[in-house]
Image (tube, rainbow, N blue to C red):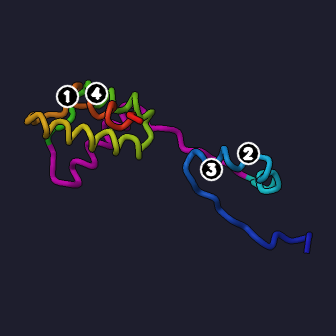
Amino acid sequence: MDSVAPFAGLLLGQPTLRRRIKLGSFAALDQRIMLRYALPGMTEVETRNYLSHHLKLVGRSDQLFSDDATALIHQTSRGLPRAVNNLALQALVATFATNKTIVDESAARAAVTEVTAE
């Protein structure tokens, strides 16, 4: 039984999975992981392209996020897609609430406040 590998698995998860596996209670599992890979956050250009791509998917080809707003969303989210999505959505809501047509830095700041508030 020890001469063959009876099980091969693939673990995928959020960044917290890596920290949990490092806990002492999972030491046996941690020792058996042969390969590890973590996706880094997107660069600012990738974040800009990511937002643009999602807007194109819903039929918007014009620039909806100002450069300042995109930079703030990227900086706050560290380029992590889920955080970018959450901040962008809240920035869109803040823009709508103020009757503006472009997500500017003030809307992005309102989104940061909303998302990071406890």
Tell me the kind of residue under disc 3.
Leu
Q: Earlier in the sequence, mark 3 or mark 4?
A: 3
Q: Is label 1 in a helix, a strand or a loop?
A: loop
Q: Which residue is mark 2?
A: 22
Q: Which residue is mark 1?
A: 104
Tell me the kind of residue under disc 2.
Lys
Query: Residue at position x 72%, y 67% from top?
Result: 8
Q: Earlier in the sequence, mark 3 or mark 2?
A: 3
* Residues drawn in magenta: 35-61
Alpha carbon separation for disc pair 3 and 4: 30 Å
Q: Earlier in the sequence, mark 1 or mark 2?
A: 2
Q: Which mark is residue 109?
A: 4
Q: Residues within 10 Å of mark 2 (few under 14, many from 20)?
A: some
Image coords of residue 57 (percent x, y):
23, 54
Give the side of residue 44 with respect to residue 57, left or right. Answer: right
Alpha carbon separation for disc pair 1 and 2: 41 Å
Q: Residues within 10 Å of mark 1 (few under 14, many from 20)?
A: many
Tell me the kind of residue under disc 1.
Asp
Tell me the kind of residue under disc 4.
Arg
Alpha carbon separation for disc pair 4 and 1: 9 Å
Q: Is label 3 in a helix, a strand or a loop?
A: helix
Q: Which residue is mark 3?
A: 17
Query: Residue at position x 14%, y 34% from top?
Result: 102
Most extreme residue toward the right is 2
Q: Is label 2 in a helix, a strand or a loop?
A: loop
